[in-house]
Image (cartoon, rainbow, N blue to C red):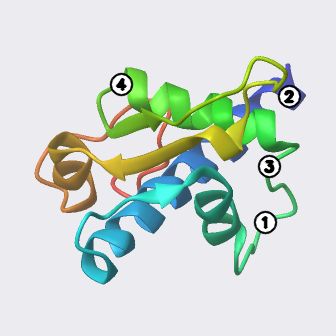
Amino acid sequence: MRHDDEQSQRDAWLCRRLIDSLALARDKSPTGDRSGPSLKREAQSGEPHDGGFDSDDHCLRLCRDLRDWGLVVEQVGTIRRIERFGLEHVTYRLSDKGLQLVREQIPPMPGVWDERL
């Protein structure tokens, strides 16, 4: 059970890093979009914890959790039939709800690390 708790805490922290990276992208880019691989790199930069993303699929799963919670918007690019869908086929941007979370205008979300908890 302890391993699952550590995994959940790491995933919550990584979700926060993804959201924070997209918040910075809003300031640097007119669209605020980040490609999947670029977002993963930015979220892992300056990694103070021992656990980053296990793989591209792990990052994609967390991004899709954020999408399902309404915190990010996902756009899927073109995929050829012979290609396996992956992180390189998507772009993300912060949704209005995600920006409200970053600005602490809404209560903390389960699954996303928040210093208010």
Dot 2: what SS? Answer: helix
For residue 49, the mark is 1
**Which of pointers 2 and 1 indicates the residue nearer the eye?**
1
Please name the amino acid that badge 2 sits on: Arg
Q: Residue at x 65, y 28 (%)?
A: 79
Tell me the CA gap for discs 4 and 3.
20 Å
Q: Can you give x and y, in whole percent of width and height, for residue 113 in the image?
A: 49, 48
- Is residue 102 found left or right of 63 in the rendered image? left
Please name the amino acid that badge 3 sits on: Phe
Q: Callout 2 environment at 10 Å: few (<14), some (14 to 19), or many (20+)?
A: few
**Which of pointers 1 and 4 indicates the residue nearer the eye?**
4
Q: Can you give x and y, in whole percent of width and height, for residue 31 in the image?
A: 26, 63
**Which of pointers 1 and 3 indicates the residue nearer the eye?**
3
Which mark sits nearer the N-terminus, 4 or 3? 3
- Is residue 39 found left or right of 49 in the rendered image? left
Please name the amino acid that badge 1 sits on: His
Tell me the CA gap for discs 4 and 2.
25 Å
Dot 3: what SS? Answer: loop
Dot 1: what SS? Answer: loop
Tell me the CA gap for discs 2 and 1.
17 Å
Tell me the CA gap for discs 2 and 3.
19 Å
Residue that badge 3 annotates: 53
**Which of pointers 2 and 3 indicates the residue nearer the eye?**
3
Residue that badge 4 annotates: 69
Q: Quadrant of residue 72?
A: top left
Q: Are marks 4 and 3 in contact (CB under 8 Å)?
A: no
